[in-house]
Image (cartoon, rainbow, N blue to C red):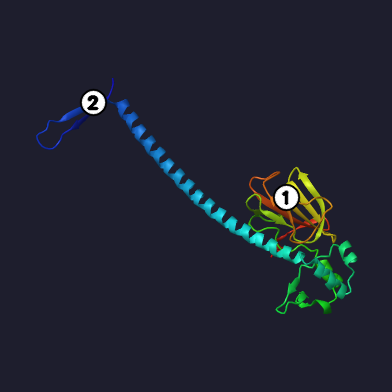
Amino acid sequence: MKKYIDILVIPQGQQPSHSFRLAAWQVKGLIIFIVAWMILLLGVTVFYGRLSGQAISAELLEAENDKLRDYNAKVVEIEKSYRQNLAIVSRIAEMAGVEIEDIDRSLGSVYDSLQTDSTGRVTIAGMQADKVPLSIGELENMRVPSGRPLYGWITQTFHVEEGKEKHEGIDIAVREGTPVVTTATGLIEFAGWDKDFGNLTIIDHGNNYKTYYGHNQKIMAGKGQKVFKGDVIALSGNTGHSSAPHLHYEIVVNGVAVDPWPYLD
């Protein structure tokens, strides 16, 4: 026997009343439809709320990356301004009694600590250049990685603990096409494709130090080329095993990867 539900509508005043009869299955169907509609409406509201939040975060991140890229470009220009004075460096080296050819062979021909004081005199490490002979230790320091290859968000740190997937460097998230600079003077040992790191550049600094720059969009310097601290060697990208644009930066000492963090600014 079918079940029915009678609905009686009694308006105010002298207007006649109205009655409706609905089968039980119709009432259940109506209730299910209303509940499903409310759940769908709630889901759409939550989804668009999250989407709007992500859009705002993306805009803020893009603006921050633009600022970091501009800052990195300024840093690169400052580094280049030092290297434009090679003739002055040569003269200073002669006055200090240092053979330029010997320095060149040891990859120490660029003095990143050159500065000009208020009188316009060129100094090395804050001292008068014509009074300071360069020691072997000072030349070696020029080939030790220091500073950052670019500025961005560090999204992955160094970890080599047992039981976890090793990550022998740091990942710096930046927009594709951001200039990548070398952190020390050296010779490019490798510049090409790697199945894991995509477009990869490896620099041998001649003192048991090597630096790796991976996932690049484009390589700007070739194998065997001498590069100086601050030289642009690549443009950052998203090549190889990479899920988002970033640079993989790695420091190897005596064949063993070390944490780059202490070497950063």
Which residue lies at the image location 36% right of the left edge and 32% below the top edge?
33
Q: Residue most toward the top?
A: 1
User: What secondary structure is marked by label 2?
Assistant: strand
User: What secondary structure is marked by label 1?
Assistant: strand
The answer, for residue 167, to whether it is visible in the render is no
Question: Where residue 76 sits: x, y (%)?
Answer: 69, 61
Question: Where residue 257 sits: x, y (%)?
Answer: 77, 56
> Which of 211 and 199 lies nearest the eye of the viewer?
199
The residue labelled by disc 1 is 214
Q: Is residue 211 above or below residue 123?
A: above
Which residue lies at the image location 68% right of the left edge and 63% below the top edge?
75
Query: Viewed as shown, does residue 110 lie left or right of 159?
Result: right
Q: Between tags 1 and 2, which lies in front?
A: 1
Query: Viewed as shown, does residue 25 lie left or right of 216?
Result: left
| Lower position in the chain sequence, tag 1 or tag 2 | 2
Which residue lies at the image location 75% right of the left edge and 51% below the top edge?
220
| Numbered badge on residue 21 | 2
Q: Is residue 172 above or below residue 143?
A: above
**To which quarter of the image does residue 27 belong?**
top left
Classify the position of the C terminus by image quarter: bottom right
What amino acid type should be assigned to the residue bearing mark 2?
Arg
Q: Is residue 85 above or below residue 54?
A: below
